[in-house]
Image: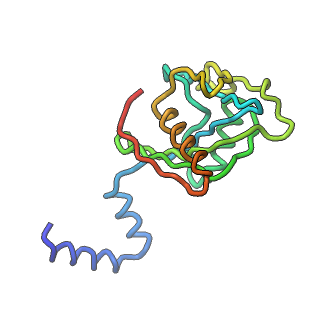
Amino acid sequence: MHPGLHRALLQLFRRLPVSARRRVVRTVSPSFTVGSMCFIERADGDLLLVQHSYRRRWGVPGGLLERGEDPADAAIREVREEVGLDVVLLGEPAVVVDPIPQRVDIVYRARLAPGCDPDRAEPRSPEIVALAWFAPRDLPELQHETASAFVVLARGRRAGETERQTVRTPGHRD
């Protein structure tokens, strides 16, 4: 684009009301879905994994945010809806950006809420066909998104979780 035309368009854009500017940006910018996922750790260190009805590999509870929903609230809601457990989120979330499917995952670590029995976990959604607790060193084959998120969280734990981590992953289909 010619620099003079670019400058003129920016000046025009600046004069638009804020709501019109937002509409323009949302129209010309790529759209991403945003989801929350939750790695739930039992007292003995085992992690809760789920098998989704529409995927071959194992994943963790999670899903897309509802319009206007806070990512932390979405993570807690998804865990309750999918496996029937109440959790407490730990530390700051990690952020994983996957540009090819245009997805952003907000990744949380969690433990069971006080008084919540890990043996109460069961599939509570048609999306979940099975669940199981796994030792971190004995994990089954993971969905691409889950594996990427697991690596990001492991890095955060080694770094003492002093900063939020953002990772871009290459596009990959499960």
Residue 131 can be seen, yes or no: yes
Q: Residue at x 73, y 39 (%)?
A: 111
Quarter placement of the C terminus: top left
Depth check: 15 or 163 in front?
163
Viewer-proximal residue among 138 and 19 = 138
Residue 66 seen from this side = no
Q: Position of residue 25 (x, y in %)?
A: 36, 63
Residue, x 57% and y 42% (percent of image)? 153
Residue at image coords 55%, 55%: 164
Tell me where residue 43 sits by quadrant.
top right
Q: x, y percentage for residue 152?
A: 52, 43
Residue 70: give x, y in percent of width and height: 62, 53
Residue at left 67%, top 21%?
132
Q: Is residue 83 above or below residue 111?
A: above
- The number of callouts visible is 0
Residue 158 vs 5, above or below: the answer is above
Residue 24 relative to residue 126: left or right? left
Relative to 91, say whether 124 is above or below: above
Q: Where's residue 1, x and y in %?
A: 15, 66
Query: How did the renderer colour the structure?
Result: rainbow
Vertical side of 110 occupied by 92: above or below: below
Instruction: Determine the image quadrant of residue 123.
Output: top right
**Is residue 55 left or right of 169 when viewed as pictured?**
right
Picture quadrant of residue 121: top right
Q: In the drawing, does residue 163 fall left or right of residue 45?
A: left
